[in-house]
Amino acid sequence: MANFSLQERNLAVVVLESSICAVILVFSLVGNILVCTAVYKNSRLRSTTSIYIISLAVCDLLCATMEMPLTLCTLITGRWVFGNAVCQIQGFVDVFAASCPPAIMGLTAFNRYIRINKTAHYKKIFSARLSKLWLLCVCLILVLYLVIARITNWQKYEFISGFAACSVEHYTEQRKAIHYGLIVSMYFVFPIFVSVFSYYKVFKSVRLHHLTVAPSLQQTSANNQDTVSVQEIKLSKSLAFVMAGFLFCWTPRWATGLTTRFSPKPVPRIIPLIDTYFIFVSCAINPFIYSGTNRLFRKELRRILCWRGGTVSSGP
């Protein structure tokens, strides 16, 4: 990886890069706090699927509070001023925040596929308890890998000026290849494949039934009648747009990140910085997608922001 110097930037570049980071930070903090508040306040927004929506918001808030402010200060000052201990924390958060959200999105997409296409099996696979268990497994596997890899000195966290942040570094090229082979395949490629497959099946079912709740979207379980409502279908559409936003951010994010990591020649300084920005933008866009595609969510956000009084009663 090339050795980038932040201190060589002129004032205009410092102001531009810092301003972009600051704007993303504000939108990410405010937006994801509003998402959590909306789900907490409105019982109609609370469902099994909302566990995953909240978990995504929490991951985004983790990045917005533990990573973005440090990167912003670094872009302003042109150097890392927080010491090694904070660098280790930010390095861990950087890898976690860059890896876990796509996996959660894949799990969310599979949840929607089972809810719409395999309704009779939904409560068996995605009960409230099992939904939390699947989420815990996805996060815990990643955390255990990162902790064990750091404790055993398989990898380390160091400040990387190109990213304007602390991130993972590797002692050998072989270890770097193994690390990214595991992370990219398990926490990006596989979740994306699951998401594309799931939403393809969901939209195929919805299209075949003219976007209505048709008899073939209703199945009888062993104990009760499980019905896919219009609200469930519209929630699936909202989450599909979230997935599209993720693809918009994470595909170029991994393209720029892997180019920076594996390029045999030095890359322009803007390439790793764009990688950082894409991670940050992905943390900020979800609240806009929710509010733009889900009427109930949008009304609750308006009520919270005092744009409109009263309770929210209409569907999405």
Image (cartoon, helix red, strand yellow):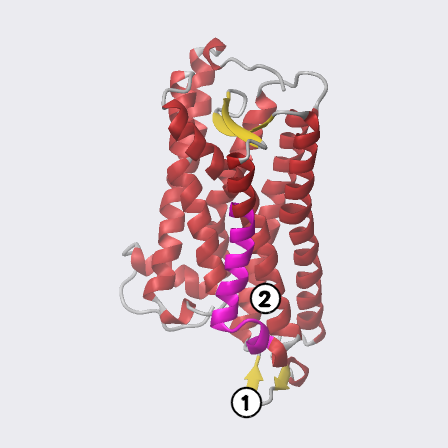
Q: Main secondary structure of the magenta part?
A: helix
- 159 on left or right of 241: left
The residue at 42%/12% (across/down) is 11
User: Where residue 215 is drawn, which disc sits there?
Assistant: none
Q: Quadrant of residue 176?
A: top right
Residue holding disc 1: 224
Expressed as whole percent of the image width and height from the top left, the position of residue 209 reads: 68, 76
Report how far apart the C-alphas of labels 2 and 1 lie in the structure. 20 Å
Image x and y of residue 264, in percent: 72, 19
- Label 1 sits on a secondary structure element that is loop
The kind of residue tagged 2 is Asn
Residue at point 38%, 62% (across, down)? 39
For the residue marked with disc 1, what is the amino acid?
A: Asn
Check whether the beta carbons of the residues at disc 2 and disc 1 lie within 8 A of each other: no
The number of discs equals 2
Instruction: Kindly tell me whether residue 286 is visible in this rendering.
Output: yes
**Where is residue 1 drawn, in percent x and y?**
63, 20
